[in-house]
Amino acid sequence: MADRTSSLPPRPDSSPARSWWGWGALDQALSDAECASLAALVPGAAGTPLPVPSIASLDLPPVRVGAPAPLAHLLSSAPADRASHTYGKAFRDVVRALYGDMAAAPDLVGFPRDERDVVDLLDWAAGADVAVVPYGAGSSVVGGVEYRAGVHSGVLSLDLSGLDRVLETDRVSRAARIQAGALGPGLESQLRPHGLTLRHFPQSFAFSTLGGWLATRAGGHYATLHTHIDDLVESLRVVTPSGVSQSLRVPGSGAGPSPDRLFLGSEGTLGIITEAWMRLQDRPTHRASASLVFERFPDAVEAVRTIAQSGLHPANCRLLDPGEAALSGVAAGGGSLLVLGVESAHGPVEGRLAELVALARDHGGSPAEEPPAAGGSAVGAWRSAFLRMPYLRDGLARMGVISETFETACTWDRFPELYEAVHRDAGAAVQKVTGASALVNCRFTHVYPDGPAPYFTVIAPGRRGSEVAMWDEIKAAAMETLGGHGATVTHHHAVGRDHRPGYDRQRPEPFALALRAAKRALDPAGILNPGVLFDAATT
């Protein structure tokens, strides 16, 4: 077929040098002076930042398992590889790395180059009682890539970054077969010559992979319609210890339970996703955006509900409560900010944006004032703050400031009570563990006709040396509040190990029985990401 290509392009350009201890690119991390300046906004923060330890100074545990000769070329025990694959990027991960706590370091890091290598490494690990923790790019904020079980002879972190190609493009059907290790920018650069895009842009876009998105049921940047990676999947190819699963590539099927749904969100506990056929879209050429300020947050919530139920499907529909708007520097005077965006590959979008703005104004919204920066806009300022936020979190962590984020989803009728409960309960938990008041903010990341996906941020001064324990207690209180108000334990950050208590309560027991049976059948030796979704002893 003339419109279908399977020739391999050159490997995509390498990503920027990554931080081994914190978020993102090394050259974007805050300096010591910037950390101190930022912490001045949090009463009770430490006076000086924690130093970033060098890898050479780390006390890594001894390697307990040797690389078998036939696979030695795929395996590394180098300190830099072990350190950078120990944790994800949650607050508790960053803090432990800053303190040089490498107790959870894997013994070996595997770098398969193709699916055959993945099969060989799994076969060896199953026979050697070595736990295998799949690793895309390590952006997990829920303990998804950290081994905590302590019952295996060794631990292998399986880094899929070598599987990073778009293998085949079907322009007629608007789909592509893509390897799981492709990072967001590399994936899009390979689709661009075809005029296509996956149109999935999580905040971690530059530092996460297709396989990670699929394994965690990741949410993208777009606020309505196709919000999760699930909706973009045609078929999956998964290597399990019991064999390779390849689902049929079709636009839809009613043939029993979906095999793809079994592996989507399984977080590497049932198999290793190696490639997928993904649904694509034409690249947008028409875009428009607007921002509105509301004096009353409840009015803004009602405006967003009306928009979500209108069928207009804005690409962006982010609502920031007064605290979040102030933190992002995009709204003055204590108002809430609504950011709207529309886009299309086929025609002008100004009319649709005008309809959305009219709905917002009907509920009390007024056009946002432009920020003082020349040529700036409230939308641009929000986007810059959004992308910069993880680096600020790391800077606060170096200053002993606790920063926790948790996201959820609930129905519209439950949101007002949930919003009040989170502020009350999270504030009480912070007061209990820190003795200080907390800053609790909220924004909507995604919205649906039947409910929003609120994303909460909690910031409070911590106590040097106790940050992780304090964070854990605040996290536990937040999960209790979500569960008690009919909200999900996670909307798009996955379960990992940190959300296990909430997930265990949320998951119906008959479904848990079925999942455990699938685990025993697909991973009889119990080596795949122990402790995620299931207890480590589940076999």
Image (cartoon, rainbow, N blue to C red):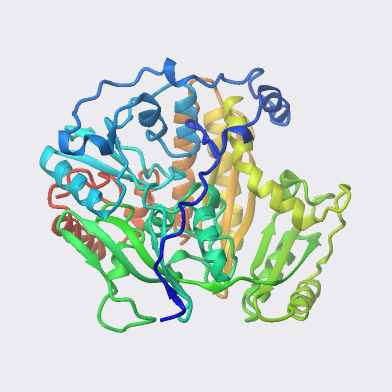
Question: On the picture, is 34 further left or further right than 469?
Answer: right
Residue found at x 74% / y 66%: 299
Residue found at x 71% / y 23%: 33
Question: On the picture, is 28 further left or further right than 497?
Answer: right
Q: Where residue 412 sits: x, y (%)?
A: 58, 69
> Can residue 45 be seen here?
yes
Residue found at the far left of this picture: 127
Residue found at x 45% / y 49%: 479
Q: Where residue 475 sits: x, y (%)?
A: 47, 41
Residue found at the far top of this picture: 57
> Can residue 149 be seen here?
no
Picture layout, residue 140 above or below residue 56: below
Q: Where residue 284 sits: x, y (%)?
A: 64, 71
Residue found at x 57% / y 20%: 50
Picture layout, residue 76 above or below residue 3: above
Which of the 4 quarters of the picture holds residue 428?
top right
Q: Where residue 221 sits: x, y (%)?
A: 58, 60
Which of the 4 quarters of the picture holds residue 414?
bottom right
Along the viewing direction, whichever of 197 and 212 lies nearer the viewer = 197
